[in-house]
Image (cartoon, rainbow, N blue to C red):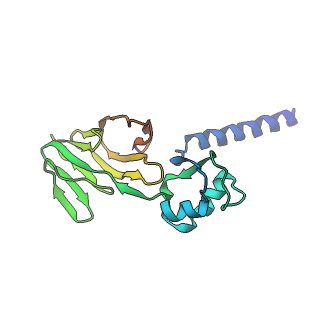
Amino acid sequence: MRTMLRLLSALLVWLAAQSAAAAQPQEPMAAYQVVAGDTLIALAGRYMEQPSDYLLVQQLNGVADPRRLQPGTVLQIPVRLLRGAPVAARIAAFRGQVTITGRGGDRAARVGASVGEGALITTGPNAFVTVELADGSRVSLPSQSRIRVERLRRLRLTGEIHRVFRLEDGRSTSVVTPTPDARGRFIITTPVTVAAVRG
């Protein structure tokens, strides 16, 4: 009986650990298909934030020799390691008190104003704002809401467009334009959920 209780207790602990792991948001990855002549060291030099980032990619993908990659192999690379070019976003419409906080401090919203990575957009009472991306995707906030633009860039390695927002307070709605080649991500995270569109 005691053995059975120990086994049951161990099973419950294991199930709880698996449930906690599943609840953790997965790190965004970019898939890259190796072509002839690629090496991890060369890819890191051209496309990653730090030349030494190839070491993590090597470990994650179980690559034995970073100087020899099999063409056709698909590498999973953490997005945070990849360089990217900024993607444009602008204020398409607003009403009432809307503030954009960025590196230069606070500024009032105006139609056509650019919004970049790191910007915090806040709506006051009886206000709303719509941010439009270059691909036509839109994020709208009603009054008393706050959202941070965490990532707006096209990855140089894969061409994927990553649009990541963090809703810090209030609500948001979005209309997402699919990318023609079904690559890219549109993600809005909140303190308790993640809403994501792939492609």
Q: Residue at 22% of width from left, 48% of height from top? A: 90
Q: Which percent across, then down, holds residue 38?
A: 59, 56
Q: Which percent across, then down, holds residue 180?
A: 39, 35
Q: Nearer the viewer, residue 101 or 91?
A: 91
Q: Nearer the viewer, residue 130 or 63?
A: 63
Task: Decide: is 180 above or below 120.
Answer: above
Q: Nearer the viewer, residue 94 or 176?
A: 176
Q: Which percent across, then down, holds residue 176?
A: 33, 35
Is residue 197 rendered to the left or right of residue 171?
right
Most extreme residue toward the bottom, as rendered? 51
Which quarter of the picture shows residue 184? top left
Is residue 168 rendered to the left or right of residue 92?
right
Q: Quadrant of the C terminus?
A: top left
Is residue 39 rendered to the left or right of residue 8?
left
Which quarter of the picture shows residue 137? top left
Q: Which percent across, then down, holds residue 23?
A: 55, 41
Most extreme residue toward the front, as rendered? 36
Q: Quadrant of the N terminus?
A: top right
Q: Residue at 72% of width from left, 57% of height from top? A: 64
Is residue 149 rendered to the left or right of residue 132?
right
Q: Residue at 39% of width from left, 51% of height from top? A: 154
Label total for image? 0
